[in-house]
Amino acid sequence: MKLAFITDPLSKLAPAHDTSVALIEAAQALGHEVWVTEANRLSVVESKAWAPLEAVQVTPVELVEGHWKPAQNWYRASPATLKPLEEMDAVFMRTDPPVTIYYLYATQILDLINPDKTLVINAPRGLQAANEKMYALQFHSVIPETIVTVEKSVIRQFVEEKGDAVLKPLAGKAGEGILFLHAGDRNFNSLVELSTKQGREPVMVQAYLPAAKDGDKRIILLNGEPMGALNRIPSGGEFRGNMAVGGRVAKAELTEKEHQICTAIAPQLRADGLYFVGIDVIGGYLTEVNVTSPTGVREIDLFNNTRLGKPVMEWLEGNSEFGVRNY
């Protein structure tokens, strides 16, 4: 197969950590052609999506003393050639958030790809619809008590009722801008004003889950089925468990409750073309659905002695005629 990956510049990826690199390694190991480009380089020519594609070869990471070790020069890329993306069997949209207007333009260009010729993972319209905070709201039976608002009085009432809460910017990533709110905090007004940009942007506020101190579990799903999980545990005085803010990672298994959550959300994920997803679960509650470039595969592989990129590629091979659209 011919596979294109739309990523951040390869030079900025961390091969020992980035899931995109793990997927590229798996595709290459199975003999598929791998091409790369960037979201801001997409074009529309004759009403079709085009991109300057670079053929890439990667040197896989090696396991050394319990850690993934990349080669010093871990990839080689050819000069770019402008091609229609419909020449590819599949296109992986793996650009890191935040989701900006330019990101949305890229998804609109990808929406011009004929789905009978090329599968886009994740589907452009699914990406457009699935804000990683807001998307979880439709699964109200498995999420913590949640509000979304710009109104300071509404947030104050919610926090006073719950005692403690967590405020999340809707466009945030990697734990950025997440705040712990406590009833009676003298900084409350300032925190809300800063987060809502003086009442111009809504924020999400969720009841604080005490289980957060034990970790925030990331579960990777392929076509709605869980592949593996890891736990991200806050370190030091930090209440966030995100790896980007220093959270410690640990091996994790899925509980029965977490399997139920996966089962509950799977039909909608499939319907929206969100085939490769990372969900966050705290204390048996779904808190976020990550669809842009979900990560965690490298860490799961390290703990479980697996290579999750391989079953992703095998699933893609099994759906090479895109029967996945009928799931």
Image (tube, rainbow, N blue to C red):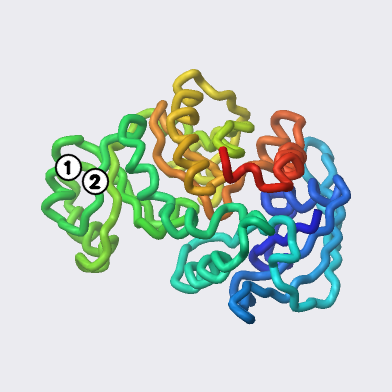
Q: Dot 1 surroundings within 10 Å: few (below 14), some, or many (20 or more)?
A: many
| Viewer-nearest of discs 1 and 2 | 2
268 left or right of 86 in image:
left
Q: Residue at x 31, y 35 (%)?
A: 140
Decide which of tag 1 and tag 2 comes sooner along the chain.
2
Q: Amino acid at mark 2?
A: Ile
Q: Residue at x 85, y 45 (%)?
A: 30
Q: Amino acid at mark 1?
A: Phe
Position of residue 205 measured from the top left corner of the image (x, y, whole percent) = 27, 47
Q: How many marks?
A: 2
The residue under label 2 is 147
Closer to us: 233 or 173: 173
Give the quadrant of residue 4: bottom right
325 left or right of 134 in image:
right
Position of residue 67 measured from the top left corner of the image (x, y, whole percent) = 76, 41
275 left or right of 29 in image:
left
Closer to us: 168 or 327: 327
217 relative to 150, above or below: above
Q: Dot 2 surroundings within 10 Å: few (below 14), some, or many (20 or more)?
A: some
Query: The residue tagged with tag 2: helix, strand or loop?
Result: strand
Q: Residue at x 65, y 56 (%)?
A: 116
Q: Residue at x 65, y 63 (%)?
A: 7
211 left or right of 54 in image:
left
Residue 219, which numbered label? none
Question: Looking at this rendering, what residue extends furthest in the top direction?
Answer: 256
The residue under label 1 is 158
Position of residue 144 measured from the top left corner of the image (x, y, whole percent) = 31, 34
Q: Are marks 1 and 2 in contact (CB under 8 Å)?
A: yes
